[in-house]
Amino acid sequence: MTDIPKADMRAVKVLPLDTGWIYKRRVGDLCERCGDIFKCNSSSDRASKEFGADMVVSECGISKPILVFREPVGIDDEFNTMRLGKAWFSRLYTGKIISMWDKTEWIGDAMVIGLEMGDKEQMMAEHSYLNHALIEQMQNPKDAADMMPKILRSAYGNLIYKHNDLITVIYLKAV
């Protein structure tokens, strides 16, 4: 186990009626992808350290998904983050607590207060001015929308940016 949890959420799915999370791969476990892995009494990490047992957790009712921020700015109050594609739209729901990390450490928790998914260009035009990377610069909506493609290309790479027509906007409130 590394010093930080894995931010790969591709095989993590929400269980019916938002009763928890399930990890659907044969290698690794859900705990490795949870923002509370080092604090949770039921984590596979704790079982390994305390009991010397290899435990694999594939389902959990309290797992906290991880959102990684390349630049953890503008995350002190209410803000949004944009993620290419529609995967995050199906993983999260209003009221869910997520764990925010940068590449080396935990930077805080936040509650999902809104989710929108739609056309990349339209979503950037409507929501960029409240994006965490731009909110402190107090950009007007037009300027922020013009700056957002560069930020997303830098985060995802030009090829991934170019081949994603949808974007998920996640509104968060720091807790």
Image (cartoon, grey):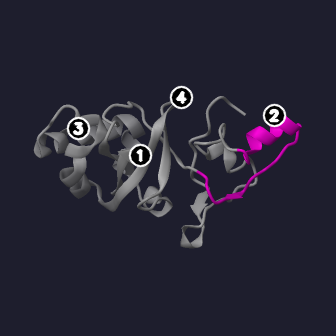
Foreground mark, 1 or 2, reads 2
Element at badge 2? helix
Q: Which residue is mark 3?
A: 135
- The mark that comes first in sequence, 1 or 4, is 4
- The mark that comes first in sequence, 1 or 2, is 2
Give the amino acid at mark 4: Glu
Neighbour class for label 1 at 10 Å: few (<14), some, many (≥20)? some
Give the amino acid at mark 2: Lys
Q: Which residue is at 34% across, 38% downward?
A: 153
Query: Is 158 or 29 nearer to us in this picture?
Result: 29
Q: Mark 3 to mark 2: distance in Å?
A: 41 Å
Q: Which residues are magenta?
A: 41-63
Residue 130: quarter of image: top left
Q: Which residue is at 47% across, 56% downward?
A: 96
- The mark that comes first in sequence, 1 or 3, is 3
Q: Mark 2 to mark 4: distance in Å?
A: 20 Å
Residue 136: quarter of image: top left
Any mark on residue 160, and which? 1
Q: Position of residue 32 (x, y in %)?
A: 67, 43
Query: Is 96 or 130 nearer to us in this picture?
Result: 96
Residue 58: quarter of image: bottom right
Q: Mark 1 to mark 3: distance in Å?
A: 24 Å
Q: CB under 8 Å between callouts 1 and 3?
A: no
Any mark on residue 105, and which? 4
Q: CB under 8 Å between callouts 1 and 4?
A: no
Q: Which residue is mark 2?
A: 49
Q: Position of residue 25 (x, y in %)?
A: 70, 55
Foreground mark, 1 or 4, reads 4
